[in-house]
Image (cartoon, helix red, strand yellow):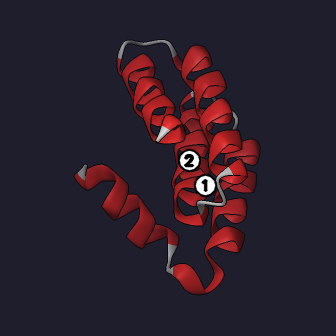
Amino acid sequence: AQARALSEAARVQEYAGRPHEALQTCREAAELARRADDVRLQAALQLRLADTLDRLGDPAAARLHRSAADRLLGEEGSAYEIRSASTES
């Protein structure tokens, strides 16, 4: 629950024009999701990190996070499915 709350806080920070703070908050959320062994949330956070890094002008790092999301998902589903589910909430 804590990881999801931080994820939403990161979203708000990004909408408020604070991408660097959003990046840090999202990293914290990803670590909590990892500790909780929530693979789908980890993947969703990796995608959010990738999107933020793209906005900050770091496409190479963004690609790494997208690759990490794909590896996390494996049989769980595609990154597209995760992205769609995370934007519905």
Q: Nearer the viewer, residue 38 or 43?
A: 38
Along the horizontal axis of the image, is 11 left or right of 44? left
Q: Nearer the viewer, residue 86 or 2?
A: 2
Q: Residues within 10 Å of mark 1 (few under 14, many from 20)?
A: many
- The residue that mark 2 highlights is 45
Question: What label does residue 42 carry, if any?
Answer: 1
Q: Residues within 10 Å of mark 2 (few under 14, many from 20)?
A: many
- Residue 44 at x, y = what percent? 51, 54
Task: Label 1: state its secondary structure.
Answer: helix
What's the amino acid at mark 1? Answer: Gln
What's the amino acid at mark 2? Answer: Leu
Do callouts 1 and 2 mark residues in contact (Cβ within 8 Å)?
yes
- Residue 31 at x, y = what percent? 71, 41
Seen at 67% across and 34% down, the residue is 27
Along the horizontal axis of the image, is 48 left or right of 23? left
Seen at 48% across and 26% down, the residue is 10
Give the spatial CA distance, label 1 vs label 2: 5 Å
The total number of labels drawn is 2
